[in-house]
């Protein structure tokens, strides 16, 4: 068997794994997909010019099979949202589904996630509800600018802001440092994002095994996945990317990526497979 024939056979096997046919796989994106990213736990890891993590690894794996190529670049989270709004980013990931983002892009769900209260382990009783959190006015909460977990989350942080109890940081590591220092009593975000950030930074890695996650019933499970820009992408390119990611999710590739990077206790309170 020639080397070419061997490669063709291997390609069929790889495509079959995702439920794709070789004929369908030839439907490439019309151009390189512009994918600015921001460091976000193990979902996206930025180390200088090197960008890795769960989502970049999935995209790179699929790009060799689907022939959609991705150009990654690192930007701050708040800047990433602006780029997507202006049509300067073709995709936004990972992202919680919100009404505002639905106006800007087509959403492809990949997993379920939710924000929880995050604190350092202590004898302090758990906060059981939004009302209880808002009533304990001596407690401060740190969040990351640009994070959005839906209307209930926005309502909580708006009230905390009014009460003078909200601390806003530019990134997750900065939020972790504020929590570690004791300036804030809680953070409010998806556990996997916080846990991944502290494990990857020597300034806060010592709190990785001391984290406590307390869900609030007012913060429900939400779809998390990727947004495909309505401004910058053609309908054909959106269709190709949507089909590619939906088949990746059905194959179990996305959840396997999370399970490979995160401990079960981190995923338990903040993530579920679709």
Image (tube, rainbow, N blue to C red):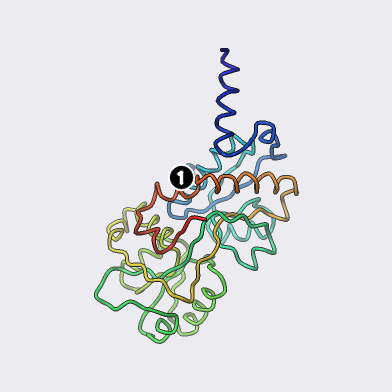
In depth, the one of 34 and 106 nearer the eye is 106
Q: Is residue 70 left or right of residue 215?
A: right
Which residue is depicted at the point 33% across and 76% down? 126
Residue at image location 27% in from the left, 58% down from the top: 206
Instruction: Say whether residue 9 is left or right of residue 210.
Output: right
Q: Is residue 188 left or right of residue 64?
A: left
The N terminus - image quarter: top right
Q: Position of residue 60 (x, y in %)?
A: 54, 39
**Mark 1, other Cα within 10 Å: few <14 / some 14–19 / many ≥20:** few
Residue 32 location (% of width, % of height)? 66, 40
Quarter occupied by residue 107? bottom right
Q: Secondary structure at mark 1?
A: loop
Residue 214 locus on image (x, y percent)? 37, 71
How far across and down, in percent of the image, does residue 28 sit? 69, 37
Q: Give the residue at mark 1.
A: 48
Residue closer to the observer: 79 or 62: 62
Nearer the observer, 214 or 84: 214
84 over 148 or under it: above or below = above
Q: Quadrant of residue 103?
A: bottom right
């Amino acid at each position: 068997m020639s080397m070419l024939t061997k490669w063709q056979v291997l390609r069929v096997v790889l495509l079959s794994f995702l439920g794709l046919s070789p004929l369908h796989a030839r439907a490439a994106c019309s151009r390189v997909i512009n994918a600015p990213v921001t460091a976000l736990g193990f979902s996206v890891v930025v180390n200088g010019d090197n960008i890795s993590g769960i989502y970049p690894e999935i995209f790179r794996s699929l790009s060799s099979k689907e022939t959609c190529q991705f150009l990654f670049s690192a930007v701050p989270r708040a800047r990433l949202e602006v780029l997507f709004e202006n049509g300067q980013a073709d995709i936004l990931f990972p992202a919680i589904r919100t009404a505002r983002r639905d106006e800007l892009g087509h959403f492809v769900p990949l997993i379920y996630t939710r924000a929880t209260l995050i604190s350092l382990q202590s004898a302090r009783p758990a906060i059981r509800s939004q009302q209880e959190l808002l009533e304990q006015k001596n407690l401060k909460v740190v969040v990351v600018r640009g994070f959005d977990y839906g209307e209930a989350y926005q309502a909580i942080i708006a009230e905390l802001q009014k009460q003078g109890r909200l601390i806003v940081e530019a990134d997750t590591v900065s939020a972790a440092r504020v929590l570690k220092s004791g300036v804030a009593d809680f953070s409010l975000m998806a556990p996997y994002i916080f846990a991944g950030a502290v494990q990857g930074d020597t300034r806060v890695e010592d709190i990785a095994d001391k984290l406590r996650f307390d869900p609030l019933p007012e913060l429900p499970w939400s779809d998390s996945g990727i947004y495909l820009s309505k401004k910058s992408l053609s309908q054909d390119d959106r269709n190709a990317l949507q089909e590619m990611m939906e088949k990746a999710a059905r194959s179990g590739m996305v959840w396997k990526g999370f399970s490979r990077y995160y401990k079960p206790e981190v995923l338990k309170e903040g993530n579920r497979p679709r």
